[in-house]
Amino acid sequence: MTSLPLARRRRGRQVLRNTVVGWSFLLPNFVGFAVLTLVPVGLLFYYAFTSWNVFGGAEWTGLENFRQMLHDASFRTALRNTVYYTVFHIPLTLGAALALALLLNQRLRGVAFFRTVAFFPYITSIVALAQVWNMLFSPGYGPINAVLRGIGIDNPPGWTTSADWSMPAVIVVGTWREMGYYMLLFLAGLQTIPGQLYEAAKVDGANAWQRFRAVTLPGLRPTTFFVVVLLTIGSFKVFDVILVMTNGGPGQSTLVLSQYIYQKGFVENQFGYASAVSIALFAICFVITIVQFVINRRGTD
Amino acid sequence: MTLLEVPVADTRLALDPPPARSRRGYRLLGYAALLVAAAAILVPFYWMLMSSLKSNNDVYTIPVQWLPDPVVWKNYVDIWQKSDLTTWLKNTLILSVAVTFLQVFTGSFAAYGFAKVRFPGRNVLFLAYIGTLAVPWQSYMIPQFILFSKLHLSDTLWSIIALQAFGAFGVFLMKQYYESIPDELLDAARIDGMSEYGIYRRIMLPLSVPALASLTLLTLVTTWNDYMGPLIYLRSRDLWTIQIGLKTFVNTYNAEYALIMTGSVLSVLPIAIIFLLGQRYFVEGIASTGLKG
Amino acid sequence: MKRSIAAVLGATAAISLVLTGCSSGDDEGSSSGPQTLTLAGWSFATTPEFKTLADGFHATHPDVTVELKEYDAANYDTQMVADLAAGKAPDIYAQKTLKNFYTYQNGKQLLDVSDVASKLGDKVGGISSYQADGKTWAIPYRQDSWVLYYNKTLFQKAGVSLPDGSWTWDDYATASKELTAKLKAAGSKAVGDYEHIWQSTVQGFALAQTSGATIESGDFSYLKPYYDRALDLQNAGAQVKFGDATTNSLTYQAQFGKQQAAMMVMGSWYIATLLKQQGTGDAEKFEWGFAPAPQQTKATTGTSATPVTFGDPTGLGINPKIGKNKEATAKAFLAYAAGADGAKALAGIGITPADTEAVKDTFFQLPGVPQDDLSKFAFTKHDTKPENPVSKYTAALQNILSDLHTAVMSGSKGVDAAITEAQNRAKTEVLNK
């Protein structure tokens, strides 16, 4: 009977000890993070309920900004385009990055060179990247349409100059640019999978595909989770690729939320409304991330 | 997935070795495919390189000029004379190194707390980290700038260090990696009387070399290529980074495109070299071999 | 007791003296002592006007040093908004785009400079653009206007008669098509005209030249004839297609400077650029001139009428946080920049100042500037309307009109459908929000 409170007390002491130790690890990063990022982000949540104009004036307007958002057709367009981008960009980039990582994790002659090349789209200036891709996509003079005409397609798409094809074009470039980035994360993740597991699977007679499903995928689970969360957030926040490729056009065909936020804030000086749109974007990302966390946890348990 | 089937000296995924001659044929084919893909990926860089050898009004033409005519080597001389490229490179280097160091150190340190120490409130705190990733920077840029100005950080190199060094990215990346390191390894060390700090330094850090390498490279590249951060925070000429500096070749109605491309080529090269050197740390870590014993 | 009170008072006074001394710094001097003004500009390496003004002012006011603060050309307003919000902005800052003037004025980030404006009188073009609530908030030092540039060499090669100031847009379109056909026949790759991708190349003229047209009305039907003409020229092959220009990032400097097109409407800033590029070899050497922009109707054509064109002024405003004692000096700087002396200094480096009549001689003495009468007429005589008339709604409406521009010019939407959509958006998102 007496052992129960004792055990509880011992556990309590253990929790306290762990809390102190845990916080001591977090502190160097957390202090910087809390002061420099968390505080301004917190302010944003306040500004979303005001008519903030950046120069001090922030009149409390309650839910007015959110009400306005409900009736804002451009917001809906931006949201729809953002979802369009995200739905295609995530699986494409995930697939391309994983394939590259698997390929470049082999013992290859010149693997260092090939890895560097795969990373190049990410380090090359995004402006140069966008300009080259735009040239390739050029409806009248671009090599892509020249090839399409060559194989008998008489009316090839207008790509970045057409309302229907601008988003696919942007998705291709977004994937192209980021695959090397996520490849690097997968490459690191692949190193955690013990080689013996592959040997054992081979002995059991598993073919390459079976080994990939039984060994590689489960071993990459923490990395894949990380990559999927980052990709989701990154795709919802997509900004610079759009800005340099199409600047949202033609018309509003590639207008995305981040760009809309920038426009409302810095161009139209409605920072209160821009804050509210950011909060909406945040809420969407956050809910999806939490769902991903829950699924991930269920999978590991 | 077909790429995976190309048996290029593969120890893990390849099919059982086919007869030697056809295997060599496959391998050559595989290399040829890789080289073609590599060339295709490098097209934008190639164009950048060629544009840096053109005169300004030849950069954008219809149709595209894939070879400069005439070749203008002068750009590579002009850029050093017309601009403070040395200062820009120096500042960029200082920032990249400092940010990377702090991000890797504090990030991996905090990640250990998140991954391997159980304490109440841990998950909520971690969600706060992830949550800030989901807020677009341009929406809280101004409140942050006002805060930094009050702290007398703006228009100093410290502002960029403070801005970039404590992000959620490094914490998240390292946490995920640590979670793939089995707890049994740590418990064994705890029984041996090692403190948590000792475990972090002696076991976790050496085991997470590939993750540290990718965090280092990604942070380095992000800081090196960052444009908006320095744009908002660094106003004095002598603090400019390369990305800001190159923008001085653009004014309202005109731009020196050839020089911008020259500068971009010069800015990409150091990163490419660092990457080439750094990628060798992506080898099967001791993490997986550690399980053997 | 009394002594200690006196001591405390003395110490307090001393401390407050030290404190005020510290906080005001070089603001201390009266307007007669040496002073430093800070001035915001952008891209100094390629934009010499700020240094010219600073040096010119220092020459006449040796006590005053104007210190330049460099900003990014493309993100000037983003940086300036941040600096003003944090209270770190320079004493004087340029109003780079008229579109954003309302943000600064409405946000109380500009000092009333009505007294400077009243002293300058009405010789300075564009000053009315900076007036709101019955006061003047910035003073223009530069007023570009859009003109028609033409390549005499190509015109002669094609055997088409040069612009004579009598052109309407229909004359321009006819000439462009004729040039295209005849240049092709003469074995040249050049086309009739180049129309740059900016929305202003169509909308600026439509707004300025259509009587009764305003952006704020939310009625954009005035754009239709201008878009119909632009699309017709594209489809006739007389100018590069919009989609090809955007995807290939074409620059107007190369299109005109490398003789790819025989005509181009562009702002007067291009005069100095073309002169410079012909000097450095970036542009080819050919004979050129400029004429008044084509007109909507014959009523405003011919050298006896005043051609209607557009162009936004660039002005200087004063940060209200400037020290009281520096206010007078800052206003003197604005008066100098907009006045005859500043105008001459600017014309000397090829910039179109706000007062063009006063600098005609200086400007046309620059080496390489076309000497024909029509160029001189185009430079001095014009009714320049603002592209971005100042209002609360301008920035938001221009965003909608920009979407209309890319949709129509790329051919992804018909003119009528795009105008209807823009009008609906203007109504629901901006005007009746």
Image (cartoon, coloured by chain):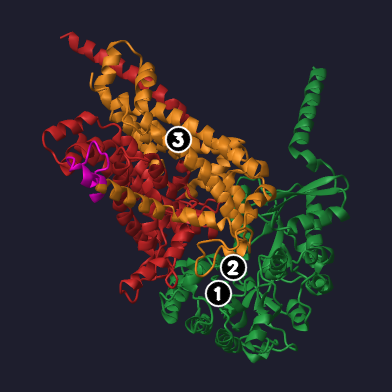
Chain colours: A red, B orange, C green
Which of the pair B189/C145 is nearer the observer? B189
Both marks 1 and 2 on one chain: yes
Q: Quadrant of residue B255?
A: bottom right
Give residue B293's mark: none
The residue pinned by badge 3 equals B277
For residue B10, above or below residue A133: above
Residue type marked 3: Leu
Q: CA distance from mark 1 to mark 3?
A: 58 Å
For residue C300, above or below residue A170: below
Q: Position of residue A63 (x, y in %)?
A: 41, 54
Q: Position of residue C60 (x, y in %)?
A: 88, 56
Which residue of the protein is positioned furthest toward the bottom in this rendering?
A: C298
Instruction: Give the position of the N terminus of chain A as an image quadrant.
Output: top left
Q: Main secondary structure of the magenta part?
A: loop
Residue range of the region highlighted in magenta in the rendering: B1-24
As helix, strand or loop, the secondary structure at mark 1 comes to: loop
Residue type marked 1: Ile
Q: How many marks?
A: 3
The residue pinned by badge 1 equals C215
